[in-house]
Image (spheres, helix red, strand yellow):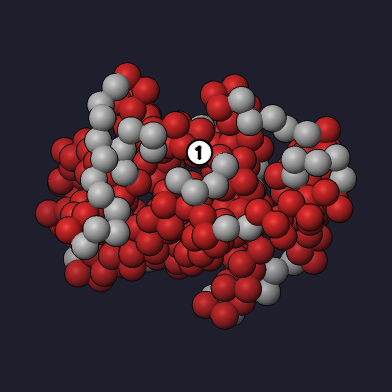
């Protein structure tokens, strides 16, 4: 029963995260990426501080260190994702971010010495195929490969790096949440990402790499509040509390549903269309998730 509770909680997270791609893509018209990151996670850390303060008074150095390691992967993952999203489409960003499901079993094998099950590998293969189909603007695989080869840009490369960093974060969440109190680690992650966003934003500004841009309006304020409260505080608490109930590979498979939600939100908020080929890809992703669920239950 605990396993199903964990899986449902993580699936709910994918819905929350899926909504961020279109909102952030739209918000970046009015704010520079790193400043957005600093404000988003700075507010999240302040909101969460009163709830975590009693735990922080009782925590130890090892817990803080573990939270710092998670925070560094979290921060660098969001930096590369947010900067990459400024240079590519929300649908494509969701697809490339979703490829982190491929890296998780490899990292888990080296870090935790745990081999993935054959059913999980099959699920990952199907999910990858589904993600490729989902991100295609054409009506077949050839159209996508042609599109990917011609359109792959620096934003896509940054997002691919983000996928690798998030894969590290998912595996180390499994390692650390079995040893330490998850609430202080949540706070440290939020704090590092918020402070890091402000520092990088200021550094990039004074070095003329990226000038600071900020123009407050209703859509930007909504994006900041949604990503701060729901996608940062709530989603991070859910991940660190419930991911330990499932394996990192299974968590990655569940998180791979996120690009579907990202594409749906992008369709309604940004008018980014999903091709018929992409709709079939959604079905393939769901089949991969179902296979993982059925055969992992038989193996347990």
Residue 233 left/right relative to 113: left
Element carrying mark 1: helix
Task: Depth check: give the residue in front, 186 or 132.
Answer: 132
Residue 121 to residue 242: above or below: below
Q: Residues within 10 Å of mark 1 (few under 14, many from 20)?
A: many
Residue 53 left/right relative to 80: left
Q: Give percent across and percent down for residue 29.
A: 39, 34
Task: Depth check: give the residue in front, 100 or 1.
Answer: 100
Q: Which residue is label 1 attached to?
A: 21
Q: Give percent across and percent down for residue 25.
A: 46, 37
Q: Can residue 92 be seen by looking at this rendering?
A: yes
Residue 233 to residue 124: above or below: above
Residue 286 left/right relative to 235: right
Callout count: 1
| Quadrant into which the N terminus falls | top right
Q: Residue at the spot x=58%, y=72% of the render?
A: 108
Task: Depth check: give the residue in front, 292 or 203.
Answer: 203
Residue 181 to residue 89: above or below: below
Q: Give percent across and percent down for residue 161.
A: 51, 64
Residue 221: quarter of image: top left
Q: Residue at the spot x=26%, y=69% of the render?
A: 65
Residue 245 left/right relative to 39: right
Q: Give percent across and percent down for residue 240.
A: 42, 51
Task: Depth check: give the residue in front, 4 or 231.
Answer: 231
Q: Residue at the spot x=57%, y=58% of the render?
A: 153
Q: Can residue 44 be seen by looking at this rendering?
A: no
Q: Residue at the spot x=39%, y=38% of the render?
A: 28
Residue 136: quarter of image: top right
């Amino acid at each position: 029963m605990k396993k199903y509770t964990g899986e449902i909680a993580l699936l709910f997270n994918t819905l929350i995260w899926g909504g961020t791609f279109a909102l952030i893509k739209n918000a970046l018209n009015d704010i520079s990426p790193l400043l957005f990151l600093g404000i988003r996670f700075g507010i999240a850390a302040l909101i969460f501080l009163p709830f975590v303060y009693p735990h922080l008074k009782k925590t130890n150095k090892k817990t803080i260190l573990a939270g710092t390691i998670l925070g560094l992967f979290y921060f660098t993952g969001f930096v590369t994702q947010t900067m990459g999203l400024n240079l590519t489409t929300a649908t494509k960003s969701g697809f490339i971010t979703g490829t982190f499901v491929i890296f998780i079993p490899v990292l888990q094998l080296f870090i935790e010495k745990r081999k993935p099950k054959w059913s999980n590998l099959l699920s990952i293969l199907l999910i990858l195929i589904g993600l490729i189909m989902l991100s295609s603007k054409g009506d077949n695989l050839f159209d996508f490969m042609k599109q990917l080869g011609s359109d792959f840009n620096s934003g896509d490369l940054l997002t691919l790096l983000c996928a690798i960093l998030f894969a590290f974060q998912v595996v180390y969440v499994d390692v650390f949440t079995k040893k330490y109190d998850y609430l202080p680690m949540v706070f440290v992650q939020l704090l590092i990402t918020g402070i890091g966003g402000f520092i990088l934003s200021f550094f990039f500004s004074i070095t003329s790499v990226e000038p600071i841009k900020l123009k407050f309006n209703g859509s930007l304020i909504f994006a900041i509040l949604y990503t701060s409260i729901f996608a940062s505080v709530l989603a991070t608490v859910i991940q660190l509390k419930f991911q330990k109930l499932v394996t990192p590979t299974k968590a990655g498979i569940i998180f791979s549903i996120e690009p579907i939600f990202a594409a749906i939100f992008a369709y309604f908020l940004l008018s980014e269309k999903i091709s018929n080929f992409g709709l079939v890809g959604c079905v393939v992703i769901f089949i991969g998730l179902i296979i993982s669920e059925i055969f992992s239950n038989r193996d347990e």
